[in-house]
Image (cartoon, rainbow, N blue to C red):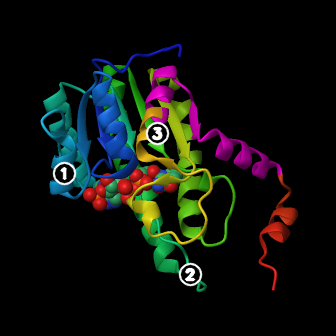
Amino acid sequence: MSRAMDVAGRRIWVVGASSGIGAALARELCRRGAHVAISARRADALQAVAGEWMTAVPCDITDADDVRQAADVVAAELGGIDIAVLSAGYWKQMGSDFDVESINQHLKVNVGGMANCLGELIPRMNVQGAGVIVGISSVAGYRGLPGSEAYGASKAAQINLLEALRVRLRPDGIDVITVCPGFVKTEMTEQNTFPMPFMVSAEQAGRAIADGIEKQSARIVFPWQMSLLMRVAKLVPDRLWAIALTPRS
Ligand SMILES: NC(=O)c1ccc[n+]([C@@H]2O[C@H](COP(=O)([O-])OP(=O)(O)OC[C@H]3O[C@@H](n4cnc5c(N)ncnc54)[C@H](OP(=O)(O)O)[C@@H]3O)[C@@H](O)[C@H]2O)c1
């Protein structure tokens, strides 16, 4: 693999790393020689992931003050933040009733929480004149899927937000990478009862994301089967999409 940027020696903050993709990625980055700090709400789970190799800094991304304090601690512990991975996220399938509370909760964590992190990272990276922000969105943001109204809307918002920031921050030397995983076996997908094609392990996801960061890809989508499927799905006309996904009675 040709590497445009080695993560070895980089100071990396992974937010949402007490389990799942964030935890696996943090371990992978550590293995590749990065200096890693990790955050999430569950302090015990976070410390278990951190072991003696990473710095654990608990924080709730929905609380802007908490994020600011965590960013201060991480920057002090690592001596700066070169790369930040925003992996914290929330998913709950929408039932048969339209659930306004669920929409608001998804927006609060996935969009508001990401915004709180960005609000801390962008000014710091601007001062440095360099930095990489990696946002973990989802292929669920590509098209509207029944049951995924709340989650999908929040993931589509993340994709759009990160794309706009990639343009805005480019002149400042800050790169933005959007990650759109397909199904990954984590605590998040444990609750799902529907089929999850092409599912990969958290470790495979961690490696794919670390590879993408080192290649400086603008968008990292995996596994390739899901990437292909969703690229085709994006081309399906809206009316046909609705007809194709309407359950047959
Ligand atoms: N698994 C999949 O199939 C899949 C597919 C596409 C995209 N994704 C995305 O990948 C990301 C990681 O998900 P995952 O599958 O690894 O699920 P996970 O194992 O449930 O991990 C979610 C992480 O987010 C943290 N988190 C949640 N709310 C938080 C908050 N308010 N403040 C700080 N941290 C918070 C959790 O830690 P605490 O509970 O300790 O706070 C945990 O570390 C999410 O953005 C998800 O949407 C997952």
Question: Relative to 53, is 60 above or below?
Answer: below
Q: Residue under label 1, please give it.
A: 58
**Quadrant assignment for ligand 1:** bottom left
- Amino acid marked by disc 1: Pro
Q: Residue under label 2, please give it.
A: 95
| Residue at position x 28%, y 21% in the image | 33
Q: Which mark is residue 248?
A: none
Question: Relative to 236, is 79 above or below?
Answer: above
In front of the other: label 3 or label 2? 3
Task: Give coordinates of residue 18: x percent, y percent.
Answer: 27, 51
Asked if ligand 1 lies within 8 A of label 1, the reply is yes
Question: In this rendering, would 168 be left or right of 238?
Answer: left
Looking at the image, can residue 62 be seen? Answer: no
Q: Secondary structure at mark 2?
A: loop
Asked if ligand 1 lies within 8 A of label 2, the reply is no
Q: What distance separates the C-alpha of mark 3 from that of mark 2? A: 30 Å
Indicate the quadrant containing the C terminus: top left, top right, bottom left or bottom right.
Answer: bottom right
Asked if the residue at tag 2 contacts the one at tag 3, i.e. Cβ–Cβ closer than 8 Å, the answer is: no
Q: Residue under label 3, please give it.
A: 204
What residue span does the magenta drawing correspond to? 208-235
Q: Nearer the viewer, residue 135 or 182?
A: 182
